[in-house]
Image: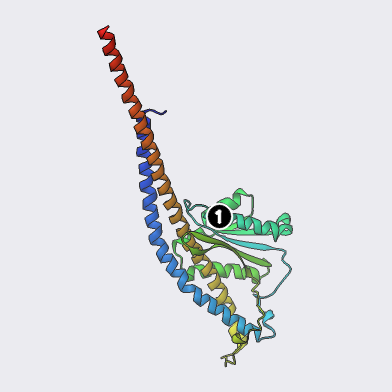
Amino acid sequence: MAGLKEIRTRIASVKTTRQVTSAMKMVSAAKLKKAQDAILQIRPYAEKLHQILTSLSASLENVEDSVYTQNREPEKILVLLITSNRGLCGGFNSNISKKAFELVKTKYSKQLKLGTVDFIGIGKQGGRQLKYKGLKVTSEKNEIFDSLTFDNVSKIAQEAMDSFANGKYDRIELVYNQFKNAAVQIQTTEQFLPVEIEDTEDDNTNFNFIYEPSKEYIIEELIPRSLKIQFYKALLDSHAAEHGARMTAMHQATDNASDLIKDLTLNYNKARQTTITNEILEIVSGAEALKG
């Protein structure tokens, strides 16, 4: 059994750690509220925009002529992996990185062997894991989390859109954590480009609207905006999921620290009791020896 001094030192160390994890939990909870409000506000807008795009596309015959809907043979692939800049958030980063690895190994195994799969890491943790796996990271956009605004996100989205439009990549995939609640994140993969136009026979989505200036013009304007909104929503989802994961991880760490302190205190009391018992036995034995 460890000595009394060693146990006291460990108890003090664990108590300090518990103070840190408890403070981080409260900070993450405050940040989560703001991030959660942001993603819940944009989701209805993004869904409605997608509904309008689908409804318009279903009524046009030449919607496939758009530069962003051209379905080419996927020879060159770009994967946008969204993680976080900081750790201490449980399996948040490792789980989504594994999802990206599984995507390229199963869906794009041929391109991976040929070396035509590129990654853009959005978040330091993801970029670090990609490089560790030996995958090709063409660039990192870690600074975006310093100011997560639509204008800043649009610039990154536009770069990806331009790289598809000029033929640099034939397929662009988006991999991120979708926020469900503070304890649950859904590892999600979405095809960012080319845009998949869904055929729908639902009469509720085909209304006899009058469009100005024209359906074709609206489609051309709507697709780029819809892509930017999709990318912005993915980043907001990941941002909220990160704070939820960190709050949950720090809550568990705080509870574990409390349990460890209880165990160490019990061990300390047992060791102290043993020491006192031994001292009493020594005194009694000394007294008996003097009597003899």
Q: Could you say which is closer to the camera, residue 12 or residue 276?
A: 276
Q: Is residue 168 visible?
A: no
Is 50 drawn above or below residue 284 in the view shown?
below
User: Residue 87, image x and y in percent?
Assistant: 48, 51
Quarter of the image for the C terminus: give it. top left
Place of residue 143 in the rendered image (x, y in percent of width and height, measured from the top left): 48, 60
Q: Amino acid at mark 1?
A: Gly
Apparent side of residue 89 relative to residue 13 in the rendered image (left or right): right
Front residue (pair 89, 7): 7
Q: Is residue 14 left or right of residue 139?
A: left
Q: Return the x and y of residue 220 as percentages of the image width and height.
A: 60, 81
Secondary structure state at the residue bearing disc 1: helix
Residue 279 in which image quadrant: top left
- Residue under pointer 1: 126
Q: Residue at x 63, y 65 (%)?
A: 173
Residue located farthest toward the top when viewing the structure as drawn? 292
Indicate the quadrant containing the N terminus: top left, top right, bottom left or bottom right: top left
Seen in the picture, residue 20 relative to 75 is either above or below; the reply is above
| 149 with respect to 120 (left or right) | left
Residue closest to the eye, 221 or 279: 279
**What residue sits 61% from the left and 84% below the top?**
55
- What residue do we see at 40% from left, 61% from top? 31
Residue 274 visible? The answer is yes
Binning the other alpha carbons within 10 Å of mark 1 as few (below 14), some (14 to 19) or many (20 upward) gives many
Q: Is residue 128 left or right of residue 277?
A: right
Q: Quadrant of residue 17?
A: top left
